[in-house]
Image (cartoon, rainbow, N blue to C red):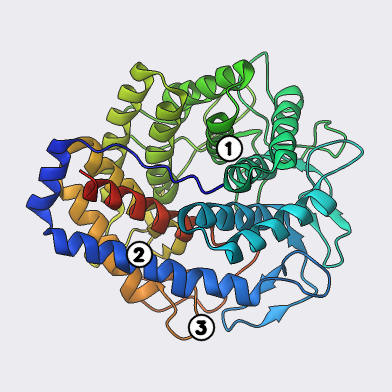
Amino acid sequence: MINRIHRPVSRNKLFAVFEVMKKGELIKWKDDLERELKENILPFWMKYSPDHINGGFVGHISYLNQVNEKADKGAVMHARILWTFAAVYRMFGDDAYLKIAGRAKDYIRDFFMDKEFGGVYWSLNYRGEPAVMRKQIYASAFVIYAFAEYFQAGGDKEALDSAIRLFREVEDHAFDSERNGYTEALSREWNPVGDVRLSDKDANERKTMNTHLHILEAYTNLFRVWKDTRLKQALENIITLFIEQFIDPGTWHLNLFFDDHWNNKTTFVSFGHDIECSWLLHEAAEVLGKKELADRTAEIAVKMARKNMMGLDSDNGLSYEFFPLENRLDSDRHWWVQAEALVGYFNAYQLSGDGEFLKKARGIWNFIREYLIDRNHGEWFWSVNREGIPNTLNEKAGFWKCPYHNSRACMEMIRRIEGYHRN
């Protein structure tokens, strides 16, 4: 089931884009994106990541493509591989992509799904035995997101049923019906736990922007194929939570951490999450189909993207984080931050017609091509520093380094540019 989804583009915006870039340049840009996706990113994952001995995908691949066959395997990594290859199959129709997606779907079903208590395990050892069994809601969200995409790719009813079941479990166990929002993590049996952190760098707070952002993303994708009343209400509620709680209307940055009572515990700015949220929130409102929310989130997206430019450097790279209390900038350019900025700025251009956003998107792509793409070993570096020197300590593939951000950015840009061609 190849289902190509394209967004409508107005005539005015079509003419505006040609004022900033010639048609041939736009076509070349799309071709570059497609080439990067098909000839660099996807082949890396197809060649190195499948675990042909123990099943699923290996848990760690180094900067030099050295596979650690005994590394633990993460639910998020497997879900992101599933989403990516289901999505590229929908775009290009290559059965080899669907085969990789099916491998990921089967492994998640057989090993990550908790058949006794529901939900998904956070991690497994390399043999597929549970390692960390707590219910990190972030992981549940990514599996919902991926299963919904796989259903759209091949019509797999089992995948849709699993996504629906996970949605109901998240709503039944993780939703705070008294104060609103979703708790960060629960025990295997869905009971409260003391340490809810997603990673060591996160604050130990029970409500986080990051998990809510990916619940938003998951529910949006599920709502595309399952028009359930409870899901619709949950999606509208989480969009509203972003507008009323997570986005600071004074700064247009995100508030990242809250306690159970919505006391803000945020102490820094995450440029990558700001720009990622800007376009995902607007997309969610469009899929929901409520014009007033779509219009409001469009305005917010443009404001967030404009404010986000404060993190850009003269080389067009977007910095990682800013710590206002210390007046300290983490100027490293992480792979996922650049990927989300590429889409976020282009989205702001489409919504506003302001050619400056298009120039920034083009600048981000030029930065990615010059500094982040690993021409020797494939895929993208984890990050480069301000001098453009690659980070050789962090992995090419692992719990967090997956094909999702950069593949999605390429696909989003291909779709959006193609939208101009059809007008």
Circles 2 and 3, Cβ within 8 Å, touching? The answer is no
Q: Earlier in the sequence, mark 2 or mark 3?
A: 2
Please name the amino acid that badge 3 sits on.
Answer: His
Give the tally of numbered discs. Answer: 3
Residue 73 visible within the image: yes
> Dot 2, how many residues are within 10 Å of its Cα: few (below 14), some (14-19), or many (20+)?
many
Camera-side residue: 369 or 15? 15
Relative to 306, residue 77 above or below: below
Q: Earlier in the sequence, mark 1 or mark 3?
A: 1
Camera-side residue: 203 or 75? 75
| Separation of residues labelled 1 and 2 (CA atoms) | 25 Å
SS class, disc 3:
loop
| Separation of residues labelled 1 and 3 (CA atoms) | 32 Å
Q: Which label lies toward us, 2 or 3?
A: 2
| Residue 114 percent location from the top left of the image | 85, 43
Relative to 123, residue 375 above or below: below
Please name the amino acid that badge 2 sits on.
Answer: Leu
| Residue 322 percent location from the top left of the image | 39, 51
Residue ID for mark 2 = 33
| Residue 377, numbered label | 3
Q: Residue at x 66, y 71 (%)?
A: 49
Relative to 174, residue 340 above or below: below
Q: Earlier in the sequence, mark 1 or mark 2?
A: 2
> Dot 1, how many residues are within 10 Å of its Cα: few (below 14), some (14-19), or many (20+)?
many
Furthest-right residue in this view: 116
Residue ID for mark 1 = 218
SS class, disc 1:
helix
